[in-house]
Amino acid sequence: MEYVVETNALVKKYGQKAAVDNMSVHVRKGDIYGLIGKNGAGKTSLMKLLLGLTIPNSGEIKLFGSTDLGAARMRIGSLIEAPAIYKNETAMENLARFSLLAPTSKNRMHELLELVGLGDVGKKKAGAFSLGMRQRLGIAIALLGDPELLILDEPINGLDPAGIKEIRDLIVEMNRRGTTFMISSHLLDELGKIATNYGIAHEGVLEEITAEELQRKCRVSLKLGVSDPAKAQELIRASFPELQTHIEGGKLHILSDVNDPAALNRALVMADIGVYELAGEGTGMEDFFIERLGR
């Protein structure tokens, strides 16, 4: 297994408080790793440790399979908390300044601004940008040098729905081209659309789960109370062969996603099968995370 990020029992304390408490992280090459947790759960502290912005009290960090962290960090782009930008300069001038750290051609800088939706800001100073525009500029800066790993802390903060979709599409396209991502976000629905793996941070501790495992745990099934469960099961197998069913406790349970429950209900009633209960059961993704994070 090729890991881009691997930590073992990582600890970072501020006084007596452990912001990161024995965190073991595993981000594979090609992942979109979603980091989830309440404020103060250790998400930003973990990202800062990976980037060398703070020093761990104990534990081990490997980046791209190496403990030579200085060299490995040259292959990483990042946006942590609010983007650090020069407010009296244009977007292009900001990129030119940061390109001293990550050499990039002027043509590529123009491409990056187009990519994040800032291609038409011209000579407007960054200090006059909206919060969303500053986020876009921060992402463009993180992309300088075409990094193999991008670490983004709340990258869609302040964006409107159209801007969120643009950034989401950008992440998916870059991932398709080979870029690995670690992204923290409070927007579970948005993260759920793109993440391949999750790290759930709570009080400095991390629980990891794949998107496939999460889907299985959060699958919501449909429970049917009907007058004749066996007859209803036969009808569903004949008319809706894509649905998986089983009978338990006198109820018919459908384990597959039902796109149109109303159509299913009509089919049962037309077959003279009485339906007295139709209810979803299971844990949704939001409830799953809330349970782990504490209410």
Image (tube, rainbow, N blue to C red):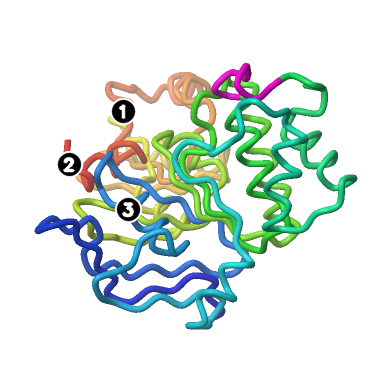
**In this image, 88 relative to 221: left or right?**
right
Q: In x, y percent, where is residue 118?
A: 75, 28
Reply above or below: 197 against 255.
below
Q: Residues within 10 Å of mark 3 (few under 14, many from 20)?
A: many
Q: Residue 14 colored magenta?
A: no
Task: Tell me if residue 23 can be seen.
Answer: yes
Q: Which residue is mark 1?
A: 279
Circle 2: residue type:
Gly
Q: Main secondary structure of the magenta part?
A: helix
Give the quadrant of residue 40. Answer: top left
Q: Which residue is mark 3?
A: 200
Q: Secondary structure at mark 1?
A: strand
Q: Residue 129 colored magenta?
A: yes
Which stretch appears magenta? 125-132
Q: Residue furthest front?
A: 88
Q: Residues within 10 Å of mark 1 (few under 14, many from 20)?
A: few
| Residue at horizontal 29 percent and vertical 71 percent from the top | 10
Circle 3: residue type:
Ile
Q: Secondary structure at mark 2?
A: loop
Name the foreground residue: 35 vs 73: 73
| Residue at horizontal 60 percent and vertical 69 percent from the top | 29
Q: Residues within 10 Å of mark 2 (few under 14, many from 20)?
A: few
| Residue at horizontal 74 percent and vertical 19 percent from the top | 124
Decide: marks 2, 3 in contact (CB < 8 A)? no
Q: In x, y percent, where is residue 68?
A: 52, 82
Task: Tell me if residue 235 can be seen.
Answer: no
Distance, label 1 to label 2, CA atoms, is 26 Å
Q: In x, y percent, where is residue 116?
A: 72, 34
Q: Which mark is residue 294?
A: 2
**In this image, 252 relative to 88: left or right?**
left
- N-terminal-most mark, 1 or 3: 3
Circle 1: residue type:
Ala
